Image (cartoon, rainbow, N blue to C red):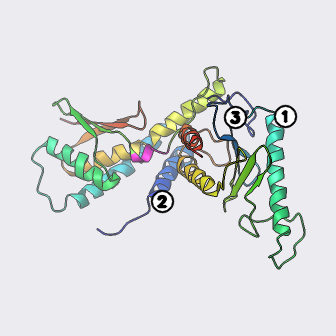
Amino acid sequence: MQFFGGSEISPSPPVPTATGNNAHMMYIFNRNGVCLLYREWNRPLHTLNPQQDHKLMFGLLFSLKSLTAKMDPTNAEKGNLGIPQLPGQGCSFHSFRTNTYKLSFMETPSGIKFILITNPRTGDLRETLKYIYNLYVEYVAKNALYTPGTLIKCELFNTALDQYVRSIA
Amino acid sequence: MGREVSESCIDNLLTEMVSTYCNRFYANKPELAARRIEAIGYQVGHQLSERYTMERPRFSDHLEAIKFICKDFWFELFKKQIDNLKTNHRGTFVLQDNRFRWLTNMSIEQPPENGTSEELSIVADNKALQSMHLYFPCGIIRGALSNLGIPCAVSADISNLPACSFVVRIKA
């Protein structure tokens, strides 16, 4: 698995590894929109260059989160659309599904966003994303050689992630 | 001896200690930083060995003391024993831990073969930082042994992670 060049902020996608994987790709963003990890296992169609792709993804989720929170019928207060929400405030959006893929999303209280794109038949992936967050804490957050806010270049994390994703039903 | 502390707390404290000594206190003098970290380990090992040998009789010879380090001492510190002990019967012992607890979460990515020189120097820096983390456990072993009356020199070898070997040379 190799990372070729790429700018500091957004990594270029690596060569896809095993085929027949259930998951297509995965993004991890931090609170400031920096893409910490982009991992691709099965993505036949590339439309944008990596930097634009990451910006689009982050913007999409930011807006979706904001919109779903504001449209919440059970919420008493009526804020203005566009005000940034703190992680955990209001209702939390967790997935959307199209006829060709399903996107699952999880945001941690520290602002780390996990996005996993899989085939549309997968069930609820909230527990999966929680487990991946656990892997992140063990191999990235606790890694003495990792500087927070930079690209994740930890082999142990990558291996554990690949192994786990392969086992998602 | 019932009080406990969270393991993540200790891990983070050690990481921060190494990083502070290497990057702030002795920024361009890695040998001084290494010596300082090892000295801290020495104090810690000294006091820990006092605590863990409270009810035991004196050790009859060097091998007994090293075996104590491998079994009881290592178990108290890391919840496991040393996996492999080798000696040349002339004062050198090699203690091998196949999964050293403080190194399990550390990893860096290997650059591609045609990486730029900048990337390669980053990898070299990371390797240096990784070896800095080993001075503390080396100091602990040295402190523990010297408290038991065995002056020695300890160095570490991480040629195959996550296994870690500590080489103890007893001063004659």
Q: Quadrant of residue B49?
A: bottom left
Q: Which mark is residue A47?
A: 1
Residue B57 lies, in percent from the top left, at: 11, 57
Amino acid type assigned to the residue bearing label 1 in the image: Thr
Q: Is residue A62 left or right of residue B125?
A: right
Q: CA distance from mark 1 to mark 3?
A: 14 Å
Furthest residue in direction left, as rendered: B60
Residue A127 lies, in percent from the top left, at: 60, 57
Q: CA distance from mark 2 to mark 3?
A: 38 Å
Amino acid type assigned to the residue bearing label 3 in the image: Asn
A94 or B109, which is in the foreground? Answer: A94
Judge whether residue B116 can be spotted in this image: yes
Furthest residue in direction top, as rendered: B114
How many marks do you count on the picture? 3
Q: Which mark is residue A42?
A: 3
Mark 2 on the same chain as mark 3? no
Q: Is residue A42 left or right of residue A53?
A: left
Q: Which residue is mark 2?
A: B9
Please name the residue shown 19% across and 29% down the image.
B88
Residue A28 lies, in percent from the top left, at: 69, 47
Q: Which residues are magenta?
A: B101-105
